[in-house]
Image: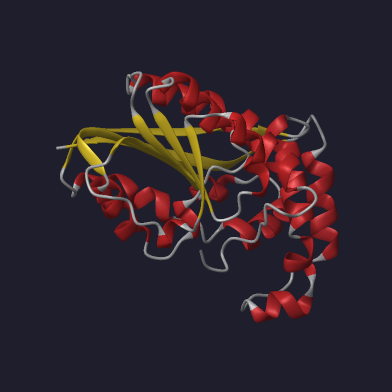
Amino acid sequence: MDDRYWFANSSSDEGSRLRLLEAIADPRSVRLLTDLQIEEGWQCAELGAGAGSMVHWLADRVGSRGSVMAVDRDVTLLGHLDARPNVTLVEASIEDLDLPRGSLDLIHTRNVLMHIDGADAIVADLVEGLRPGGALLVEEADYFPLAGVTSPALLEVMSALVAKWTWARTLPTTISRLPVRDVAVTVDTSMLQGGSTEAIFWIHTLRSVEHRLTDPGVAGANGRPPVSRAAFDETLALLADETFWTPLAAVVCVSCRRR
C-alpha cells in the first residue's frame, strides 16, 4: 500500500477511528452481503479487516463448518478474534496476498483498494480466488461529491486528503470486463451533518493526519502546499456544528459472481 494511506492500526486513536467507521459502514455492508445469500459452510475472506466487526458477522453467518480469513497488514486490532475457532488471522498486505485459485465462496473488501496502486490487477486476482459461483463484494469511497462542498475551508482541507481517491468510479467497468456474472452496482451517498457519527469520524481522521496536512515540510515532500491552520481549525469547528451540512463522499459498491 503506497503513501496514499496515512493511518496505522497501532496508533493510539486508530481503534476509535475504525470503530466509528464500522458504525457508519457496517449497516450497508451487512445489507449487501445479506443480498448475496451467504450460506453455512462457506469459506470467506475479509480483506482489510480493520477492527474486525465484519469478520465477526461473517463468522456467525458461515458457522462452525465455514471459515473466515481475516487479512490486514497490521492485525493489532484483531486480537479479540482469536477466540473464534472459524477465524484465521493473516497479517499481510493485499498486494502480497496469494489466494489459491478457486478456493473461496466469498471475498469482501471495504475502503482498501482505493489506497493501492494497481488495484485493477488485484481485483482480477480476487476473482480468480473465487470458486465458480463464488461472490465478490467491493465497497470503495470516491470523492466526486467534493465538487459540491459548501465550505471553502473544508474543501481546502479535505481536498488535500481525499481528492486523489477517485479509483472507485472505474470499478464497475473493471469488474464487468472480468469472467463474472450478476454484476450489481450501488452508489451510497448522503449529506454530511456536523456532529454526526460520520462527522466525528472525520474529526478523528483529520487529527490523526494533521501534521501531514499542515506541516510545510511534510506537505512539500508530497508535492503539495500545506493546508492553512485557519482552514484546518475552521473545518474541525464545522464538523462539530450540528447546523452544518455538506456533500462530501460517495461509496461505490460492486458485487458479482465468478462465472
Front-most of 3 and 171?
Answer: 3
Can the viewer see residue 179 in this picture?
yes
- Color style of the picture: secondary structure
Residue 108 quadrant: top left
Counting the numbered discs, the total is 0
Residue drawn 67% across and 57% down?
A: 8
Seen in the picture, residue 57 relative to 100 is either above or below; the reply is above
Residue drawn 32% across and 23% down?
A: 36
Judge from the rendering whether residue 139 lies leftward or rightward of residue 135; answer left or right.
right
Seen in the picture, residue 117 relative to 171 is either above or below; the reply is below
Can the viewer see residue 227 in this picture?
no
Residue 10 quadrant: bottom right
Judge from the rendering whether residue 93 lies leftward or rightward of residue 18; answer left or right.
left
Residue 98 quadrant: bottom left
Judge from the rendering whether residue 230 lies leftward or rightward of residue 94; answer left or right.
right
Seen in the picture, residue 198 relative to 209 is either above or below; the reply is above
Q: The C terminus is located in which quarter?
A: top left
Residue 85 in the image: x percent, y percent? 51, 29
Residue 49 in the image: x percent, y percent? 54, 42
Judge from the rendering whether residue 43 lies leftward or rightward of residue 80; answer left or right.
left
Front-most of 239 and 113?
Answer: 113
Residue 21 in the image: x percent, y percent? 64, 37
Residue drawn 59% across and 60% down?
A: 5
Residue 243 in the image: x percent, y percent? 79, 30
Residue drawn 35% across and 32% down?
A: 43
Seen in the picture, residue 43 relative to 65 is either above or below; the reply is below
